[in-house]
Image (tube, rainbow, N blue to C red):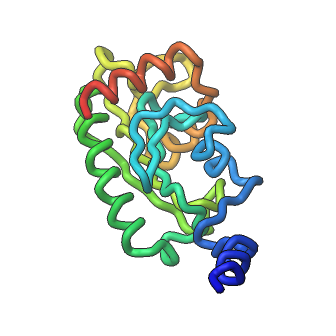
Amino acid sequence: MTSFIIRDHVSRAAPPSWQTDPDCPFCRIVAGDSPAFRVYENERVVAFLDILPLRPGHTLVVPKRHVKRVSELPGEDAAAVGEVVSKVAGALVKAVGNTALNVVCNQEYAQAVPHVHYHIIPAPTFDSSTKISPPMNEAGTKQVLSHKEMHRKEFESRTELEEEEGEELAKRIRAHL
């Protein structure tokens, strides 16, 4: 009598909320198919360093479930993501020695990867004793830049995170969790 129930259950398609997108770089990281400098992970969320960071410590917090828009993120996942954003932000400020952060989640506009994710980015500091660089003019001397100019220069200077730097930075962040 129960064999038809089992047969129907086994052959049914998984609901969309359980599926991942094989073309999504974040889904590939979640599945372990693509490398990432992971700083935190639980059953619903993963946090890893951005491979093209704006500044050292630029971290992404991503729900494991593939959802394109934060406005469509189920409440349980939204709560889990929020908790991890706070936890990772706390560890990040200790790891980089900078309490100023920019926390951003884009939806469609300026969203490079169509999978919900939060950026936690240390703000620029203008103290030459830190690894986070002050804005420089073309001659390499300190100058006051407009916000627009500073953002343009930061965006243009993005380079891929080096393996050694990524591993060391992820380790420092994890040490403060």
Query: Horizontal and vertical percent for residue 147?
Result: 44, 47
Q: Position of residue 167 (x, y in %)?
A: 48, 19
- Say which quarter of the image contains residue 141: top left
Q: Residue at x 53, y 13 (%)?
A: 164
Quadrant of the image for the C terminus? top left
Identify the image quadrant of the N terminus: bottom right
Against 118, is 19 above or below? below
Comparing 63 with 120, the one in front is 63
Q: Quadrant of residue 98?
A: top left
From the viewer's side, name the closer residue of 81 and 2: 2
Q: Residue at x 33, y 29 (%)?
A: 174
Q: Tally the marks.
A: 0
Q: Is residue 156 above or below residue 106?
A: above
Left or right of residue 1, residue 50 in this image: left
Name which residue lies at 45% across and 54% down: 118
Q: Quadrant of residue 77?
A: bottom left
Instruction: Examine the rendered structure and indicate whether residue 21 appears above or below residue 136.
Output: below
> What residue is at 54 percent from the left and 37 percent from the top?
50
Residue 86's spot in the image, x, y percent? 27, 50
Q: Is residue 56 left or right of residue 79?
A: right
Q: Is residue 61 above or below residue 140?
A: below
